[in-house]
């Protein structure tokens, strides 16, 4: 079973080698001397000359809400996969469990919807 | 079915397959520009080589020779890690997609996919999720207003549509009773292509997949008119090339996954000889890729609030309902 992962490992090594070599080549190949004027090293800003770094910039709360909702719903999806694989053997019991699970999820979803967490304005 | 595969066969196959994927990516960029050109009543690239066929190679050489600079405020190693992560995760996922039944060549067994894993489907979603880091790390490390905004948008979009994407596949998993892509293909050969009973799942998968690969009409992450270039604003040369590569290879993998899950994988219509299986697979993937290009030229871009609303309030409930209905029907019949 574990030996099935060996081909994946080979493939992943190639998949890592290609971008790594390309990044390395992007340092080695360009011949032109790098002109390091101050203007050029500034982050792109059309027309406005400069400003403070904005890494600490604040964002709309919606982005954070989306991230939290994603974690909630995606984990629920992860729980559904094992059930889905064995559903035919479990029969109606499995469907009942699925219905209860998705029912609770639906209640949460309706709550989130009514609270306006999914609204972007 | 599970035959022993020699390690050197795997190594060789991995090397060949990844090069085919890279070649596919290179010519997908050309095909897209050609098709888009024709749809917009112009020629597209036709100067480098016959019919512009050497254009991708010229592009690669050009990108590799571009001056490599970065903004002074960028965090160096994260700035380089971004494109690496994006390209690596995009490339790595293709390894589990089956493109043939497996062949006996000169007494050596060559499997129909690089890695036959029981949890191939989960692996694809898992690695795909790591890919989102490539975009947000790159955009954040650039320390540019536009890159940061683009990265935030990209991330929110990717995570929103990932839920719908994962749920849309649930119906297929219930019908096939397996997470292994080879078994899902085999199950489709026994019954019917899942695009028929899972038409809703197929459509949700296609739409969510378009958003996952940030293709038009869901190409908000790089909405030129608002964000300059989105998360890769501060990237140039091959670092930009890697992001572009990640996007196109994600598209190829997504099409391959769609073919595997819904369109019967490498099985053709009627009897398929074993040696013809990859041709069927490539043909189906090509048709899907054409549809993606077609969509890009046809549909205007959504607004960001429309995009989020569509993902959460339409695709997610529809995909969930589809899974429940499938579950009831599978057990009842």
Image (spheres, rainbow, N blue to C red):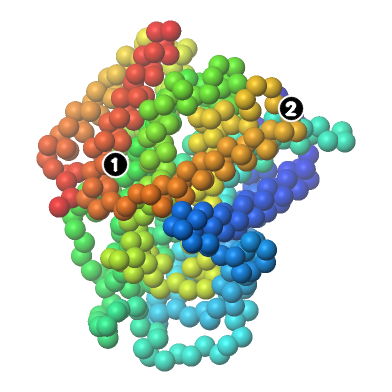
Indicate the chain on which mark 1 is placed: B
Residue at 57% in and 43% down: B286
In the image as oriented, which residue stretches furthest toward the top?
B333
Q: Where is residue B311 shown, x and y percent of the image?
A: 29, 41
Above or below: residue A24 compared with residue B22: below
The mark nearer the N terminus, 1 or 2, is 2
Q: Where is residue B150 shown, x and y percent of the image?
A: 33, 62
Which image quarter: residue A117? Answer: top left
Q: Residues within 10 Å of mark 1 (few under 14, many from 20)?
A: many
Indicate the quadrant containing the N terminus of chain B: top left, top right, bottom left or bottom right.
top right
Which image quarter: residue B47? Answer: bottom right
Q: Secondary structure at mark 1?
A: helix
Q: Residues within 10 Å of mark 2 (few under 14, many from 20)?
A: few
Q: Which residue is mark 2?
A: B273
Q: Confirm whether circles 1 and 2 share one chain.
A: yes
Q: Which residue is mark 1?
A: B311
Residue at 50% in and 56% down: B38
Residue at 49% in and 59% down: B37
In the image as oriented, which residue stretches furthest toward the right?
B106
């Amino acid at each position: 079973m574990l030996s099935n992962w060996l081909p994946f490992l080979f493939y992943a090594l190639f998949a890592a080698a290609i971008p790594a070599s390309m990044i390395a080549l992007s340092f080695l190949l360009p011949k032109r001397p790098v002109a390091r004027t101050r203007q050029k090293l500034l982050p792109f800003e059309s027309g406005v000359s400069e400003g403070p770094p904005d890494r600490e910039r604040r964002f709309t709360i919606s982005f954070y809400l989306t991230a939290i909702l994603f974690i909630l719903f995606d984990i629920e999806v992860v729980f559904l996969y094992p059930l889905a694989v064995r559903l035919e053997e479990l029969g109606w019991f499995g469907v009942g469990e699925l219905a209860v699970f998705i029912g609770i999820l639906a209640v949460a979803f309706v709550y989130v919807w009514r609270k306006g967490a999914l609204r972007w304005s | 079915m599970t035959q022993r595969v020699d390690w050197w066969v795997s190594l060789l196959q991995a090397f060949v397959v990844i090069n085919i994927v890279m070649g596919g990516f290179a010519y997908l960029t050309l095909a897209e520009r050609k098709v888009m050109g024709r749809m917009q009543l112009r020629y597209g690239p036709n100067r480098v080589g016959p019919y512009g066929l050497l254009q991708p190679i010229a592009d690669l050489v050009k990108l590799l020779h571009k001056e490599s600079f970065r903004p002074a405020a960028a965090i160096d190693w994260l700035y380089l890690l971004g494109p690496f992560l994006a390209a690596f995760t995009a490339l790595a996922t293709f390894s589990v997609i089956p493109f043939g039944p497996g062949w006996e060549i000169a007494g050596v067994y060559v499997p129909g996919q690089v890695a036959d894993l029981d949890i191939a489907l989960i692996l694809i979603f898992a690695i795909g999720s790591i890919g989102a880091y490539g975009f947000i790390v790159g955009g954040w490390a650039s320390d540019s207003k536009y890159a940061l905004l683009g990265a935030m948008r990209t991330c929110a979009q990717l995570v929103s549509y990932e839920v719908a994407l994962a749920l849309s596949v649930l119906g297929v998993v219930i019908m096939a009773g397996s997470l292994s892509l080879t078994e899902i293909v085999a199950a489709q050969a026994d019954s019917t292509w899942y695009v028929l009973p899972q038409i809703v799942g197929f459509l949700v998968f296609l739409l969510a997949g378009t958003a996952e690969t940030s293709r038009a009409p869901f190409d908000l992450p790089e909405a030129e008119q608002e964000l300059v270039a989105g998360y890769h604003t501060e990237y140039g040369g091959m670092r930009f090339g890697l992001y572009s590569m990640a996007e196109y290879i994600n598209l190829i993998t997504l099409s391959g996954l769609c073919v595997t899950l819904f369109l019967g994988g490498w099985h053709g219509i009627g009897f398929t000889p074993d040696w013809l299986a990859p041709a069927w697979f490539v043909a189906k993937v090509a048709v899907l890729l054409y549809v993606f290009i077609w969509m890009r030229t046809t549909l205007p871009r959504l607004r960001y609030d429309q995009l989020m609303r569509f993902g959460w309030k339409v695709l997610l409930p529809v995909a969930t309902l589809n899974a429940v209905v499938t579950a009831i029907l599978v057990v009842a019949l």
